[in-house]
Structure formats: structure tokens, C-alpha cells
Amino acid sequence: MKWFGLTLALMLACHQASASDSTRLPDGIVSTGSNDIAQAWLTRPTKRYAHAILGDAIEAGGLRVKLADGRLYEHILPKGFVFEDRRARLIDLDGDGRDEIVVVLSSVSEGAALAIYGIVDDAVRLKAKTPHIGRSNRWLNPAEFADLDGDGKLEITAVWTPHLGRVLQAWQYAGGKLRRIASIQGYSNHAIGSPVQDLTEIVRLTDGRTALAIPTPGYDEVAFMVFEQGEFVEAARIPAGGRIITAIHRNENTDKLEFATYPKTFVTMAVP
């Protein structure tokens, strides 16, 4: 119960962080950074793309950024695009000490792409993106950003069409370009119509390897994916005891995974 209370408190805090911004996405989450960008959030709610993959037909038409020095910027999308997401993730992808902004950019005719934005020439600009999926109402959900194979480079992971193809992919960002380096089918980090996007976590296995914890398509098992010789490999799979309905969280004190299954049964899972 304490864990559920903490989750609710964090949700309320995120809402209150930018309550004065009248154009903020209603269910949007404010991301905070520790490099050049202090905060980023999605703005300009719009109904021009009625996919409703996250539970409602309201998407974002803008991205607002607050720098560490207090300056504010906003990037406004043209009418044929939306940010089909709840937050703009802040992470330094290329190790230059400046944050990139990672968000799902959807075309109303060509579906979703994974997009990288940043502050360039005193403005928020698109730095790179994956190809769009290729048809309307097709989506992807970002997962985690971690050096999965210990080579010193971050892997950007996401699931393409998490309700259809369920394809887990890994990409790397370097030299201003995104490059796909691995792909495997059979995993999902989002239940259709749910606002919960955080169904993954980075863990350290008992043998020392770094792994991505992610549900299988039935959302009733957690698979532990390692990245070896340029490929995803499933190192272990553990039953969840029911259908996972909340974010998957690693308890920093116990190193166990915590989540809830239907109907709101709290679960702790030891990492294999």
C-alpha cells in the first residue's frame, strides 16, 4: 500500500510542477534534467489524430523546454504531426554533456517514429528520427536507455507496434544519426488504451550482466533480455502471477522488481 501511495504522490507532484502552464498536455509528465535542460514537457493539446492509444484522443502539438539558466523554448509541430506520448525524456545520448530529448513523433498518415530533439542554434530542433512505421494508427513505445553490452555506448530501446508485431528494437545515436542495431519479436511494454508506458526496467542479473526487464505479450511474465554480440538474448523468464497493470520499478534498496497485477495485487520479484 505504501508503494501505491508513493506512486500517487509522484503523479500529483508531476501534475503540480507545471500547473500554471495552461497549454500543457492534460496527462503529461514533466521531465527533469541535470545538464543543460532543466525541464521538458509536452504542450498544445490537440484532437487532430484520433488514435487514442494512451486512453484518450488528446495528443500534443508542441514541446516546451526550460534550460538550466531559465530560458524557455517551444517547438510547435505542423498540423500533420503530433507527439503521441506523455512525456519528453531527457538523456545525454552522445556523451557531450548536453541532453537530447526523446519523444514519439507521429504522422497522421504514416504513424509513429522515435524522434531525437535538442537545443540547436538557440532553438528546439529535430536532430534525428527513425523512419515512421508507414501507416496511420501504428505506434511505438520507448523503453530504456542503457549500455546493455558494456561497450560504453548507450542502447536506445523501444517496442514497435507493442499490440501487434511486438518488436523490441535497439538503436544507437551517434554523429547526429540513429542506427538500428538489433531487433527481436515477442515482447511488449504497453497495454492498448492504457496511460502506463513504463513497463520496463534495467536490472543487473546475479551473474553480473545488465538486462532489460520487459513483459511478454500476455503481460503475465517478465523476460530478462541481455544484449550479446549485437543481438538480444532472453536470459530468463519469470511468471508475474497475473496480468501486469502498473509500471515496473526496481527497488534500489532490495534490487527487486515491484509492480502490480490485476486486480491490484502488489508483487515483488527477485532478479534472476
Image (spheres, helix red, strand yellow):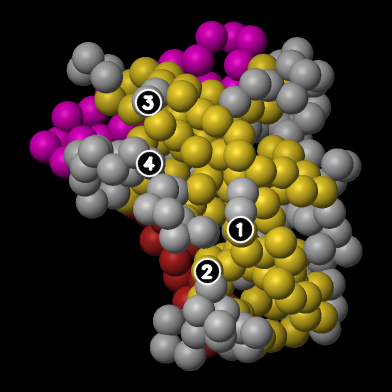
Q: Give the range drawn in magenta.
A: 61-82
Q: Residue 227 carries which label?
A: 1
Q: Disc 4 residue type? A: Leu
* Residue hosting label 2: 210
Q: Name the residue under label 4.
A: 93
Mark 1 / mark 2, whichever is N-terminal: 2
What type is the residue that disc 1 sits on?
Phe
Residue 74 lies in quadrant:
top left
Q: Which of marks 1 and 4 is in front?
A: 1
Residue bearing the label numbered 3: 175
| Residue 250 appears in the picture as rendered | no
Q: Residue 112: x percent and y percent?
A: 68, 27
CA neighbours of label 3 inside 10 A, class few (<14), some (14 to 19), many (20+): few
Alpha carbon of mark 2 to alpha carbon of mark 4: how far? Answer: 18 Å
Q: Where is 205 relative to 191, above or below? A: below
How far apart in space, not on screen, are marks 3 and 4 (Cα)? Answer: 11 Å
Q: What separation in Å lies between label 1 and label 3 (alpha carbons)?
A: 22 Å
Q: Give the overall secondary structure of the magenta segment.
A: strand
Specify few, some or many for label 1: CA neighbours under 10 Å numbering under 14, 14-19, or 20 or more: many
The residue lying at 68 percent from left, 55 percent from top is 232
SS at mark 1?
strand
Q: Which mark is residue 124?
A: none
- Of the image marks 2 and 4, the number of the one nearer the N terminus: 4
Image quarter of residue 259: bottom right
Q: Is residue 159 left or right of residue 153?
A: right
Q: How crowded is mark 4: few (under 14 residues within 10 Å), some or many (20 or more)?
A: many
Q: Quadrant of the C terminus?
A: bottom right
Which label's residue is closer to the chain start, 1 or 3? 3
Q: In this view, does 183 lie to the left or right of 23?
A: right
